Amino acid sequence: MDIPVFDSRSELYKTPYGAVPCGTRIDLTLRPLKAEGFTACTLVIYQEFAGRRLELPLSPAGEWEDRSLFTVSYTAPEEPELIWYSFRFTRSDGQQISLDKNEASWQQTVYDNSLSTPDWFGRGVTYQIFPDRFCRSRVPDPTGMIGDRRVHENWEELMDYRPDEKGIIHNCDFFGGNLAGITGKLDYLQSLGVSTLYLCPIFESASNHRYDTGDYDKVDPMLGTEEDFRTLCQEAKKRRIRVMLDGVFNHTGNNSRYFNALGQYPSLGAAQSWESPYINWYTFQEWPTKYDSWWGIHTLPAVNENDPNYIDFIVEGQCSVIRRWLRAGAEAWRLDVADELPDEFIARIRRVMMEEKPESFLLGEVWEDGSNKISYDKRRRYLLGRETHGLMNYPFRVGAMAYLQGGDAACFREAMESIRENYPPSAFYSAMNMLGTHDNPRILTMLGKPPETAPEDRDQRAHYRLTQAERDRGRALLMAGAVLLYAFPGSPTIFYGDEAGMEGYEDPFNRGTFPWGREDRTLQDWFVRLGALRNARPSLQAGSLRWLHAQGRGLAFLRELEGERTAALINAGDEPLSLEIPWETEAVDALSGETFEPVEGRLYLQMPPLSARLLV
């Protein structure tokens, strides 16, 4: 066995494991070969936020077989910090050799654990709804609403997707999904085991996606009223479902009461007058037509989150947007494009949420490892204990998709171990894990027809539907991927309709209407079973994670809590797979009912192609 000189994930070399609270003692042990002739070793530390560099000598600690031992202990800073560390060995002749992690330093996250993280989010199942497309209680009349809206009478027809003569896609066609429609389907969501309902933006906006907010104080009239929202929250709470709102605070719409470039609001907007109370929310290069905007999109003028008036309006005022909608029944906020929001702005939101509803949850949209993310040349502090409680776990999605589409299970394990090591435990267990979202093609389409075979023409992609063979393969892989999703630490998240077999390529084709009455019952029943198991088994909600197998197309891991054990086994390959895992008693596949008897403390299993088991 190849014994490493240092392994940050093994207690033989480092304790405690992973991220640590402020002020924690950290013990390190190195095991170089005696033949190397090292006489001294130095720990080199760089504290990034403090801008401080330290060097600490390691002490010789005897020998172990053919290895020399060096040890050192140091105390993590009293303030949250991101530490990078490496080692420098010295021989008797003065020669120095550096030891680092693949030519980079190891990471040590130091976080403030004085503020608790509510555990309800990570334990439960989340369901994401794009409100215009989930369910409608009536066909709406857009008369008098802001924007140039068109309503589809036919719930099942294709959305508008072609640009106008200027190449602009306006997203102004609506299907009329509304809050009352969602309320009417709460029993369905409850049957899926859903405990968190994540709604894409619901505030008045000119577009069907509503990420161009027009009025933060008003539910979009096509969705209903504030009373409808309160009713939704009340009825959801009866079913132990909490509502999460999408907070789009980096930008507004240009057609908003604050900017009001189109003059559709009675208020004096920043694009209309320098006397506007909102003028300092925005940064103009040439008033009123040239201004900072999100990714240069002129319909999304960026706001200045450091403006005191804006901070008061969104966060800190007694009737702020954050407070107002928590009081109306929301119990969580998801921060859209958290990378674009200043650290202090996010920290203010968390503080206010704790004041208003101590058990409320703050989630950030971050697409990478959030513990070391650099945004606009600045290292971010999302997970150091004073900002978000958790993040959207896009690394999980990227790793899971790569594995399901033909990649090595070992790569998925490595990606997740990096996240587990870097994140505070509360953030790792409070991540939003997903396979599909409103920003990605439908998972069934991606698994049934690999991206490299997708039609190149946009019109073809708009109308493409999987062949029966493609759909069968996609369904089998999605069912296997769903076992991975529901068994892994963090909240398993369904993008509305994925459980019903919805298809579609990129936006807007991934945002079709829910196929009520035309669901894929096989998939739907599978998700119902998984939701019930997630809610019934504490080991799946909060259990430890141990890898049993991660090689090639086979993946197996164990969740364990207070003696309860649940093992997820997946074969994402096209050939049968033999798996051997440690197990002492009879095992039952909770999904199929099959039973398996161990032999001398081992289970020997044959996994069919494109299959998964959940052993209990």
Image (tube, grey):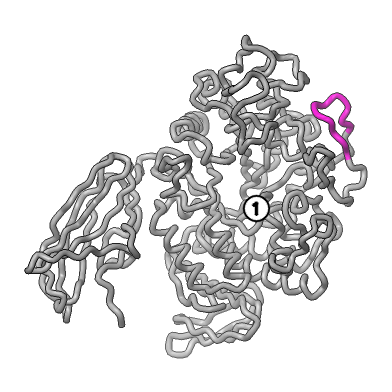
Residue 191 at what x, y percent from top left?
71, 56
Instruction: Judge by depth and name the residue closer to the eye, 456 or 337.
Output: 456
Residue located 82% across and 62% down the image: 464
At label 1, the amino acid type is: Val
Q: Residue furthest left?
A: 92
**Quadrant where the C terminus is found in the figure:** bottom right
Instruction: Judge by depth and name the residue closer to the eye, 49 or 103.
Output: 103
**Quadrant where the N terminus is found in the figure:** bottom left
Q: How many labels sit on residues?
A: 1
**Is residue 332 shown to the viewer in this render?**
no
**SS assignment for the magenta stretch, majority:** loop
Helix, strand or loop under label 1: strand
Residue 566 at what x, y percent from top left?
52, 70
Residue 136 vs 227, above or below: the answer is below
Q: Which residue is mark 1?
A: 194
Q: Residue furthest top?
A: 275
**Is residue 254 shown to the viewer in this render?**
yes
Residue 341 vs 64, above or below: the answer is above
Residue 49 lies within the magenta run:
no
**Residue range (magenta):** 141-151
Residue 544 at what x, y percent from top left?
43, 63
Instruction: Judge by depth and name the residue closer to the eye, 441 or 152.
Output: 441
Q: Is residue 282 left or right of residue 425?
A: right
Residue 112 vs 398, above or below: the answer is above
Residue 93 at what x, y percent from top left?
7, 68
Q: Quadrant of residue 64?
A: bottom left
Q: Residue furthest right?
A: 153
Residue located 51% across and 41% down the image: 339
User: How crowded is the residue under tag 1: few (<14 C-alpha within 10 Å), some, or many (20+)?
Assistant: many
Q: Quadrant of residue 13?
A: bottom left
Residue located 33% across and 47% down the image: 82
